[in-house]
């Protein structure tokens, strides 16, 4: 599942990255562009138990919301680690994007309640 999430997230993140040139302030933030890219393909299932259902931006933070199905349970830290690894996998620019201020939070919805996720502000070490 980690590999499947990684490939899909990397592709969407790179679509948002576009040219590295500075954008005028009237342009949507990088987080907003990433959210727009995700929204175009939602909902999206990753295996049997994980479904990405929402993507929004809050300032410089990309907020993803997932639903765990079939009794699946994962801790907030584990979910954050999996999604961060997915964004950072391979040869890409995510390290620099994080240094430039992007933050990612993966919230988990279940039982009518949404739990706020852990904020990721760097690629995992190693």
Image (cartoon, helix red, strand yellow):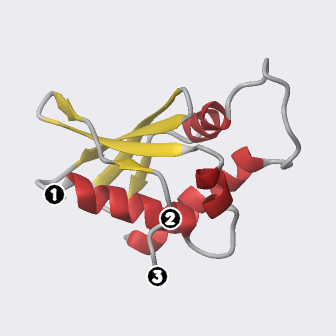
Element carrying mark 3? loop
Q: Is residue 12 visible?
A: no
Q: Is residue 78 visible?
A: yes
Element carrying mark 2? loop
- Label 3, on which residue? 126
Q: Earlier in the sequence, mark 1 or mark 2?
A: 1
- Label 2, on which residue? 123
In the image shown, does 108 or 45 lie closer to the viewer?
108
Q: Is residue 68 above or below residue 42?
A: below
**C-alpha distance separating marks 1 and 2:** 25 Å
Q: Is residue 70 above or below residue 38?
A: below
**C-alpha distance separating marks 3 and 2:** 9 Å
Verify CB contact (< 8 Å) between mark 3 and mark 2.
Answer: no
Q: Is residue 8 above or below residue 20?
A: below
Residue 100 falls left or right of residue 4: right
Q: Earlier in the sequence, mark 3 or mark 1?
A: 1
Residue at (40% x, 52% y) in the render? 45
Q: Residue furthest top?
A: 26
| Callout count | 3
Which quarter of the rendered picture does the N terminus lie within?
Answer: bottom left
Crowdedness near tag 2: few (<14), some (14–19) or many (≥20) residues, C-alpha within 10 Å: many
Q: Is residue 91 above or below residue 21?
A: below
Crowdedness near tag 1: few (<14), some (14–19) or many (≥20) residues, C-alpha within 10 Å: few
Where does the image place residue 34, in percent across and percent down from the top left?
Answer: 62, 40
Q: Nearer the viewer, mark 1 or mark 2?
A: 2
**C-alpha distance separating marks 3 and 1:** 27 Å
- Label 1, on which residue? 72
In the image shown, does 24 or 9 lie closer to the viewer?
24
Where does the image place residue 106, in percent across and percent down from the top left?
Answer: 36, 45
Residue at (59% x, 43% y) in the render? 101
């Amino acid at each position: 599942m980690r590999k499947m999430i990684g490939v899909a997230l990397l592709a969407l993140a790179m679509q948002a990255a576009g040219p590295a040139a500075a954008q005028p302030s009237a342009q949507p933030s990088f987080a907003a562009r990433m959210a727009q890219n995700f929204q175009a393909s939602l909902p999206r299932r990753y295996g049997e138990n994980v479904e990405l259902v929402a993507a929004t931006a809050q300032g410089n933070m990309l907020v993803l919301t997932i639903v765990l199905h079939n009794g699946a349970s994962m801790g907030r830290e584990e979910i954050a680690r999996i999604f961060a690894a997915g964004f950072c996998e391979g040869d890409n620019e995510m390290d620099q994007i994080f240094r430039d201020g992007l933050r990612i939070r993966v919230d988990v919805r279940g039982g009518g309640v949404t739990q706020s996720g852990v904020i990721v502000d760097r690629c995992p070490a190693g």
